[in-house]
Image: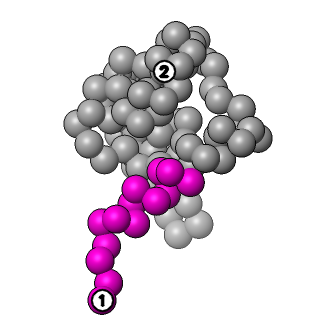
Amino acid sequence: MTRIFEERANGKILIVKPEEDYGTPLFCKVCDFPMKTIDDSFSYRKIGCCSKCDNRWGSHKSGKLNEGWTPDKTTEEWSEYIEDRISMGKHLINVR
């Protein structure tokens, strides 16, 4: 394991990080939504993004996400995708 010291205003923080990172990040590198499910973890290991982005953009561009390609975030298609992602989360809360 590699030890990294990071200075903070109120002292030192010790960060212990493995030399090789096998974990899933907290947020998808493509859409910036949280990685929440085991499917997200599988997709991250396979193609480097959450399962929703994998389903939408991974097969859409024949695996180019692995090569560093990301969708153009200025297009209408991207805006619709993000709106759909936001609306998916709203169904979890039922206020009366």
Q: Is residue 95 in the magenta section?
A: yes
Task: Tell me which label, 2 or 1, sits earlier in the chain.
Answer: 2
Side of 76 where 12 appears, left or right: left
Residue at image position (42%, 28%) is 55
> Where, quadrant-wise, is the N terminus in this rendering?
top left
Residue at image position (46%, 59%) is 87
Please tell me in which quadrant of the rendered image residue 46 appears: top left
Q: Which mark is residue 96?
A: 1
| Residue closest to the far right | 74
User: How far from the left and from the top, in percent, is residue 16?
Assistant: 35, 39
Q: Which residue is mark 2?
A: 58
User: How far from the left and from the top, in percent, is residue 92?
Assistant: 30, 66
Q: Depth check: give the residue in front, 7 or 89.
A: 89
Tag 1 secondary structure: loop
Tag 2 secondary structure: helix
Is residue 34 in view from this perspective?
Answer: yes
> Where, quadrant-wise, is the C terminus in this rendering?
bottom left
Mark 2 is on which residue type? Answer: Gly
The reply to whether discs 2 and 1 touch (Cβ–Cβ < 8 Å) is no
Q: Depth check: give the residue in front, 28 or 89.
A: 89
What residue range appears in magenta? 83-96
* Crowdedness near tag 1: few (<14), some (14–19) or many (≥20) residues, C-alpha within 10 Å: few
